[in-house]
């Protein structure tokens, strides 16, 4: 009973917000977003949302915890560590690009005011490589997933704290674009991200439990049993797009960077817990 | 349900408006057709993952591991009254409820016309 009251109270707060101006401030969006999931899953402690469907699916969780005893992403962390330590042909290393690294994931994605764009960690890694005369890595899987896994592992426990700077309207625009992509229906199946991961989160698609969107970005890159290997957020986005029979955007396109900007901002306050293991 | 929708409405409203305007469809309205499909063939399609895949979201008696996103496919005739109403719902569920997540199987040509008729016949029989 108390749960129902909490849910209604929370929904009531959000409804009051909805009567305000349409172009809500990101802060209000985030409150509504987080309140929605906390009301929908009142027994899930906040940080548990970082564990996706395993926060709400006891059987799936049991399997997942068993998998986590010998994490399938460990090799990726080791490989990524080696990449971090190995000098480029010019003798420099990633450390020269990221002097505070490798534990810097909570700084991404961020708004780069000078360039007027969202910069993700994956993009920054490739820009570092190119600045040092190395070829950029492919974004969906492979070595970049290894390096991201190492950096994510070193960053575990950092709190997600994406900033939408108020003094640059272009940042707000990028945020709005990302939000639009998340809520827009697309593809032959006419689904939005929200169709499955908000309105129907916690229900079942065949036997699969749809994960709540809160916490979606906290644990990337992930080892997915379905893939049998590591993959990045770009890979996951593309997979979702294909599943609804929509044409995916290019990895690290403006669209996917903006989407990551919005979606990561929605999870502000949760702790980073990557790399992850998922079905 | 209503309160849940309301709480996300603040975020969704602008995005939804944009998409509705931006997407052209060849066959938005269900064309006139004779609803004379084959229920048995429709059943196959309804259970086929790459075709109708109704079972992904709807309970179908006799189908294994149904999803639970949509209502159970039972007592269809008392709920829809006419076969045409069932057909329209499968053609494009967003006409009756703009927030319906069910893919528009007719409008987006997910099924061929024959497959569509077969599924309508099957669902109508439930």
Image: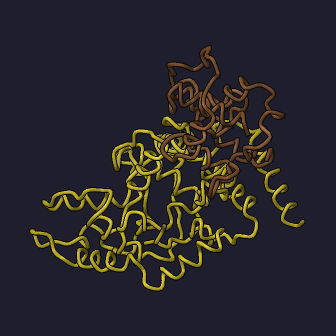
The image position of residue A3, as x and y in percent, is: 84, 65
| Residue A76, image quadrant | bottom left
Specify the farthest residue to the top.
B32
- In the displayed structure, B113 sits above or below A147; it is above
Look at the image and tell me whether residue A4 can be seen.
yes
Locate residue B98: give its quadrant.
top right
Is the N terminus of chain A in the top left, top right, bottom left or bottom right quadrant? bottom right
Residue B78, x across and y down, in percent: 84, 34
Colour chain A appears in: yellow
Residue placed at 44% from the left, 65% from the top?
A: A220
Residue A28 in view, yes or no = no
Percent from the top left, x then y, of residue A105? 42, 68
Residue beneath the point at 27% across and 64% down: A142
The chain drawn in brown is B
Q: Looking at the picture, does residue A217 appear above or below residue A54?
A: above
User: What is the quadrant of residue A121 in the picture?
Assistant: bottom left
Comparing A168 with B46, the one in front is B46
Q: Residue at x 71, y 29 (%)?
A: B86
Q: Nearer the viewer, residue A173 or B15?
A: B15
A207 relative to B96 in the view: left or right: left
Where does residue B11 sit, x and y in percent of width and height?
A: 65, 43
Q: Residue furthest bottom?
A: A69
Q: Nearer the viewer, residue A118 or A213?
A: A213
Q: Kindly give the residue lying farthest to the left in the view shown.
A: A89
Name the colour scheme. Answer: by chain
Residue B56 position (above or below residue A209): above
The foreground one among B13 and B4 is: B4
């Amino acid at each position: 009973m108390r749960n129902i009251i909490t849910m209604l109270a929370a929904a009531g707060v959000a409804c009051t917000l909805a009567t305000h101006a349409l172009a809500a401030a990101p802060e209000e969006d985030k409150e509504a977003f987080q309140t929605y999931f906390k009301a929908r899953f009142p027994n899930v402690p906040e940080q548990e949302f970082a564990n996706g469907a395993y926060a709400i699916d006891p059987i799936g969780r049991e399997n997942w915890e068993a998998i986590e005893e010998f994490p399938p992403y460990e090799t990726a962390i080791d490989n990524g560590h080696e990449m971090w330590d190995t000098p480029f042909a010019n003798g420099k290393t990633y450390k020269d690009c990221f002097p505070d690294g490798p534990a810097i994931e909570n700084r991404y994605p961020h708004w780069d005011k000078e360039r007027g764009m969202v910069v993700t960690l994956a993009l920054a890694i490739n820009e570092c490589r190119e600045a040092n005369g190395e070829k950029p890595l492919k974004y969906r899987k492979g070595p970049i997933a290894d390096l991201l896994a190492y950096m994510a592992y070193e960053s575990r426990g950092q709190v997600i704290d994406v900033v939408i700077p108020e003094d640059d309207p272009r940042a707000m625009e990028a945020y709005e674009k990302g939000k639009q992509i998340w809520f827009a229906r697309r593809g032959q199946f006419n689904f939005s991200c929200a169709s499955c991961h908000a309105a129907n989160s916690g229900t079942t698609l065949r036997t699969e439990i749809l994960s709540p969107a809160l916490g979606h970005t906290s644990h990337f890159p992930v080892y997915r049993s379905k893939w049998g290997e590591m993959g990045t957020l770009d890979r996951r986005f593309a997979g979702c797009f294909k599943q609804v029979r929509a044409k995916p955007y290019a990895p690290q396109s403006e669209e996917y960077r903006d989407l990551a900007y919005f979606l990561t901002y929605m999870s502000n306050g949760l702790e980073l817990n990557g790399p992850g293991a998922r079905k | 349900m209503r309160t849940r929708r309301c709480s996300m409405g603040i975020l969704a409203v602008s995005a939804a408006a944009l998409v509705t305007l931006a997407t052209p469809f060849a066959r938005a309205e269900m064309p006139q057709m004779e609803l004379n499909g084959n229920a048995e063939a429709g059943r196959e399609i309804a259970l086929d993952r790459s075709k109708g895949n109704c079972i992904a979201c709807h309970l179908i008696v006799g189908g294994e591991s149904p999803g639970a996103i949509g209502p159970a496919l039972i007592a269809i005739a008392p709920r829809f009254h006419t076969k045409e109403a069932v057909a329209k719902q499968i053609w494009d569920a967003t006409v009756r409820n703009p927030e319906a997540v069910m893919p528009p199987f007719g409008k987006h040509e997910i099924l061929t016309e024959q497959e569509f008729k077969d599924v309508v016949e099957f669902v109508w029989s439930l």
